[in-house]
Image: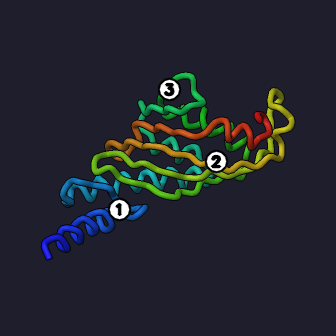
Amino acid sequence: MKKKLIIMAILSSTTFGCQPETETANTEPVTAATASKEQQTVQVMQQMFQAFNRHDLEAMASLYADDAVFISPEMTEPKRGKAAVAEIYGPLFEMAPGVQDEVKHYIYNGKDEVAVEFVSKGTVENIGPNDPPQMKGKTFELKIFCRLKVKDGKIVEDVTYFDQLAFLQQLGLSE
C-alpha cells in the first residue's frame, strides 16, 4: 500500500504539476500582488502582439520603456529605445504588408517576464532596390521565441530568437 501511495504521489506531481500552455509556471505563492503583476505582464505582451498584427507602430512603441533594449540574432548589437520599434518593424511591415504573428504558447515566470512562442507568417510583396528580386512573392512561416521583461507596465527588454537560415531559405536566399 505504501508503495502504491508513493507511485501515485510521483505520478500526480509529474502529470498534474505541469502548467497548461497559457498559464503561469510559478513557484511563488499566489497573492493579489503577484496576480496583478502577472495580469499586467501578460496584458502588455498581448497588447504588443495585437498592435503588431494591426501594424500599429505607434501603439507598439507606447508599450516599450524609453530605454528598452532589443536583442535578436539579426542585429549586430542591441538596439535601444522606443525609436527602435519603427526601425525594426517598419521595414518588415513595408516588405510583408500582410505579416501576422500567432501566439502559440506563453509562460509567465512569476516575476516580471513572459516567454512567448509564436509563428510569424507573411508574403514578401515589396522589395527595395538593393533586395534580391527572387524574394518578391515568397511566403514565410517562421517559428519565433521571445522573452519580454516588463516593469511598471512597459517592456524594458525584448530578446527574440529565430532561425535566420530557415527564414533566408524560405525567401529563396540560401540553400
Q: Which residue is mark 2?
A: 142
Q: Tell which tag, 3 or 1, sits nearer the viewer.
A: 1
Q: Give the residue pinned by disc 3.
A: 78
What is the x, y in percent for residue 163? 61, 39
Q: Secondary structure at mark 1?
A: loop
Is the residue marked by circle 3 packed among few (<14), some (14-19), or many (20+) residues within 10 Å? some
Crowdedness near tag 1: few (<14), some (14–19) or many (≥20) residues, C-alpha within 10 Å: few
- Between marks 3 and 1, how big is the CA–CA gap? 32 Å
Mark found first going from the N terminus, 2 or 3: 3
Q: Nearer the viewer, mark 2 or mark 3?
A: 2
The residue nearer to you, when weighing 108 against 38, is 108
Seen at 34% across and 54% down, the residue is 40
Which residue occupies the foreground of this view, 175 or 65? 175
Seen in the image, is 52 located left or right of residue 41?
right
Quick check: 77 left or right of 166? left
Circle 2: is it few (<14), some (14-19), or many (20+) Cα within 10 Å? some
Q: CA distance from mark 2 to mark 1?
A: 25 Å
Q: Is residue 48 above or below residue 13?
A: above
Tag 1: residue type?
Gln
Determine whether the residue tagged by mark 2 lies in a helix, strand or loop. strand
At x 36%, y 44%, the residue is 150
